[in-house]
Structure formats: C-alpha cells, structure tokens
Image (spheres, rainbow, N blue to C red):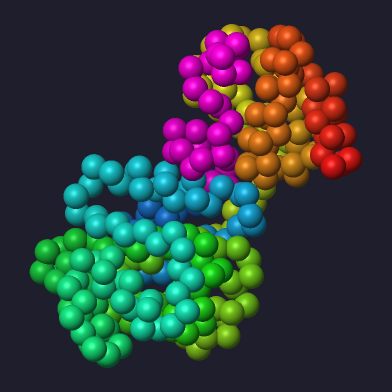
Amino acid sequence: MSYYRSFGLEKEPFSTSPDPQFFYHSTSHYTALKRLEISLRLRRGLNLIIGDVGTGKTTLLRTLLQAFKDEHDFVFHMILDPSHKSEFQFLLSLVKMFNIEPTFKSTIDFKEALEKYLFQKGVEENKTVVMLIDEGQKITTENLEVLRMLLNYETNEFKLLQLVILAQTELLPRIKRIRNFMDRVALKYTINPLDENETKEMIEFRLRQAGYNNPVSLFTDEAVRLIYQRTQGYPRRIAMLSHDSLETAVMKERLMVDDQIVNSLISQEVNT
C-alpha cells in the first residue's frame, strides 16, 4: 500500500510534478501569478520571471495556463526546452509550433511568416497570442535576438506577441548585453524561497489538497523547522524531504513526522 493511504490521504501530497492543484500560493508566487495575468490581459509584451532551481517556476507556468483554460481569446504556446543551436532551427521550431506550413528557404521567409501569423491572430481575429518559455537560461544570445525581433511586431495599442520567459538568474546578464532588450521588459519579477511560516503552510496545504482532514498536524513544529533549515525554503526540496519523512514514518509505524525522523534523514543525506 502506498504510504499516503496509511495517513488517510487520497493522493500523493509531495510529488515534484508541476501540478497546479498542489501549487501553494506564497506571497511571492501569488504576486508573480497575478502580475503576469494583468500583463497578458493588457498585451504589454515581454515578461521575465526569475528564480533559482526548485523555486516553483514550472508549476507557476502550469498554474497560469490553468487560469486561462476557459478563455478562448487567448492562444497559448509553450516551449519547455529553448536550447536550439542556430537561428534557423529556432525559427523553424516556432513556425511549426504556430502551425505555419514551413515551406520556406531562408530566415527572412520565416520572419515574414511569423509576422503575418501574429498580425492575423492579433488584429484580424483579435486573439492574444502568448508564448511561454521555460528554462529560459538555455536560450542562446542569437535566439534572444530573434525574440527581440518578434517583440517589435505591434499595433499602436499593443504587442502582437505576449512573451513569458521563466529562467534562472544567469539569464539576466546576457539579456542586459543585448541592445534594447531590457527596454522591452514590461514585467520583471524574482520568485524568492519560502520563509519558515510559509514552509509550514505549504506542507499543510499540500496535505489538505491530498485529502488529509485531521485537525492534528502530521508534522510537528520541530520537524517543520528542521525541514525549513535543511531546504532553505525551496519548494521542490521541501516536497522531497517531506515525502521521505512521511515514508519513514510509515516504515517506523509512527503516527506523525517529528524532529527525530527528519534529523535521521538529514544525517543520511550528509553522510552519503
């Protein structure tokens, strides 16, 4: 039997998959999400969400998509791996993603086709075209120039392409070296790790989402404190250590996760 059923849970509460149902709205994540929604609705163009590995950027992206799932005036496209080595390859991937028939021979042809597509969708059909790019730090400087070019397509009132780039901090210095790129940033927001109180709230939120309804917390305050200290408030690390802690509690036939369990896991990590 899966460990979570031993605690009366219906689902795995601490999966590291980017499931919007388990997206804890910390102050930082909630602010990023709402500001992104506003920027997209106003068609302001370029949005940068910066955060270290494990801060929840990908889950934020999926939650953003969920927020617009019933709005047919928005057309979303997602790039999970933007690490194309050449401008030609990148442009080819874009026209395929937009379902433009790639019968072109040069990068100029690609760019003209993309401009025509964005004009048709944004002006003739009055749609808002949104391109979401995860792992943005993998974009080459050459392809950042392609994105800058796409952001030049606009009407008098709005940008024809709404671009959301989620990336680690290493992207910023490269962007700043590209002339006129930072000038196009409508929203730049940095996602911060959780504090100790938010760490506790995240653990309890995920347990509730998984079906836990006992008023007695599964994690003692001392256990949460140790989890926070070990993970430094990074959501992915919190989920992983919380999962291991619950699993250990099952194996030791404990009714809750206490500091002894968490300490034993931390010691194992340190010694391996």
Quadrant showing the N terminus: top right
116 or 249, which lies in front? 249
Residue 263 in picture, x, y percent from top left = 85, 28
- What residue appears at the point 27 percent right and 84 percent down from the top-left corner? 111
- What residue appears at the point 41 percent right and 69 percent down from the top-left corner? 46
191 or 268, which lies in front? 268
Q: Does the rendering let one see residue 115? A: no
Residue 146 in picture, x, y percent from top left = 39, 81
Q: Is residue 16 magenta?
A: yes
Answer above or below: position of 141 versus 272: below
- What residue appears at the point 60 percent right and 12 percent down from the top-left corner? 7
Q: Dividing the picture into quarters, in which one does residue 233 lie? A: top right
- In the picture provided, is 239 more to the left or to the right than 209? right
> Could you tell me what secondary structure mostly forms the magenta stretch?
loop
- What residue appears at the point 46 percent right and 38 percent down from the top-left corner? 19
Residue 31 in picture, x, y percent from top left = 51, 48
Q: Does the magenta stretch include residue 5?
A: yes
Answer above or below: position of 193 versus 245: below
Residue 57 in picture, x, y percent from top left = 53, 52
The residues colored magenta run 1-29
- In the picture provided, is 229 more to the left or to the right than 84? right
Q: Does the rendering let one see residue 22? A: yes
- In the picture provided, is 153 more to the left or to the right than 18? left
268 or 115, which lies in front? 268
Answer above or below: position of 250 versus 143: above
Q: Dividing the picture into quarters, in which one does residue 172 lie? A: bottom right
